[in-house]
Amino acid sequence: MDTKREDEILLEKATKGDKTAFEQFYQKYKKQIFNYVYRFVNNYALAEEITQETFINAYINLNKYSEKGKPLAWFYTIAGNLCKNAIKSKNIRSEVSLDAPLKDTDGNIGMIDVLENVNDRPEITIRSKELVGKIQEAINSLPIEHKEILLLCDIQGQSYQDVAQILGCKPSTVGSRLHRARRKIANKLAVLYKEKSKKWFKWKDVNLLQKDYPST
Amino acid sequence: MVQMERCKLATKRLSFYIDGQLSDKARLVVEKHLSTCKYCQNEAILLWNARLVLKSFSSVRIPTSLDKKFTKELYK
């Protein structure tokens, strides 16, 4: 059975009042949704609040869930709307802390940026917390529409098709919006990478880059 | 003039290209254009780098209190 069908079954059960099924769905996707929200609002405590609200709102409104497309997309839509409302209604302060680990509301150390390799290629792995902070600042400086599309496509790795469902637009619109967003952030990242002497590919490296070229 | 129009076309399609969203035919057109157009090569490499940087961006650990809060709210 594919993931989409598995998720649909969990939500069907949840619609009939099976809270355990909904909890299973939550366990499966809480990390993804939390990370999306955290990068969106850039505030750890608020991200926790919005993530919880996303799942609870979805549970309350399960009867409104349409079975077209992936169930997870619906959760991204709810989370994105809550983030946008929070940004509009609150004066969210940036919380890119480089010195102190952030704590959750129970006082546990919750967040230190975790280093990840891209296809085991250490030359493009971000190893500096300072750099992570600067990239987050660059993302934060973008208009919401551009920030949203970069988070969904490039950081969350969602397909054009799924992002189109999340945002309620055509896949071709996703592509052009993504292009504008990448174009906007690319120069900032280029300056940042040069300052930090980080690997920034040139056209002569194109064969190396094509290793990451996704299959169609 | 023709060159400028082609550049405009390729620029519009570059993100689609690096994300593998073009048909084989359209991809070949872009690749052929990229092999000779310096402007589009620079654009493509800029976008490709941005995509790589963002894809390698780290994830954060979720707060340990989230589960407790969620289940409390769900089962209340």
Image (cartoon, helix red, strand yellow):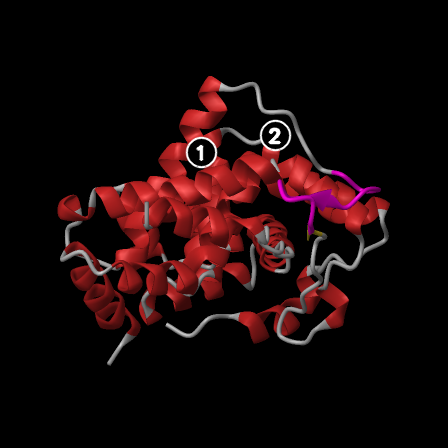
- Residue drawn at point x = 63 percent, y = 67 percent: A206
**Which one is earlier in the sequence, the residue at label 2 or at label 1?**
1
Q: Position of residue A170 (x, y in %)?
A: 25, 46
The chain letter under disc 2 is: A
Position of the N terminus of chain A by quadrant: bottom left
The amino acid type, in three-letter code, at marker 1 is Cys
The amino acid type, in three-letter code, at marker 2 is Ser
SS at circle 2: loop
- Residue drawn at point x = 51 percent, y = 28 percent: A143
Boundaries of the magenta span: A97-109
In the image, taking residue A7 as reference, residue B20 lies left or right, namely right
In the image, taking residue A214 as reference, residue A72 lies left or right, namely left
Whether A101 is among the magenta residues is: yes
Q: Nearer the viewer, residue A37 or A60?
A: A60
- Residue drawn at point x = 55 percent, y = 51 percent: B40
Residue B7 seen: no
Q: CA distance from mark 2 to mark 1?
A: 15 Å
Residue A116 seen: yes
In the image, taking residue A56 as reference, residue A15 lies left or right, namely left
Q: Position of residue A51 (x, y in %)?
A: 45, 44
SS at circle 1: helix
Whether A22 is among the magenta residues is: no
The chain letter under disc 1 is: A
Which of discs 2 and 1 lies nearer the camera? The answer is 1
Position of the C terminus of chain A by quadrant: bottom left
Residue at the front extreme, as displayed: B76
Q: Position of residue B12 (x, y in %)?
A: 42, 46
Which of the numbered marks, if any, corresponds to residue A148? none
Q: Are marks 2 and 1 in contact (CB under 8 Å)?
A: no
Judge whether A121 appears above or below A38 on screen: below
Residue position marked by numbered label 1 in the rendering: A83
Residue position marked by numbered label 2 in the rendering: A141
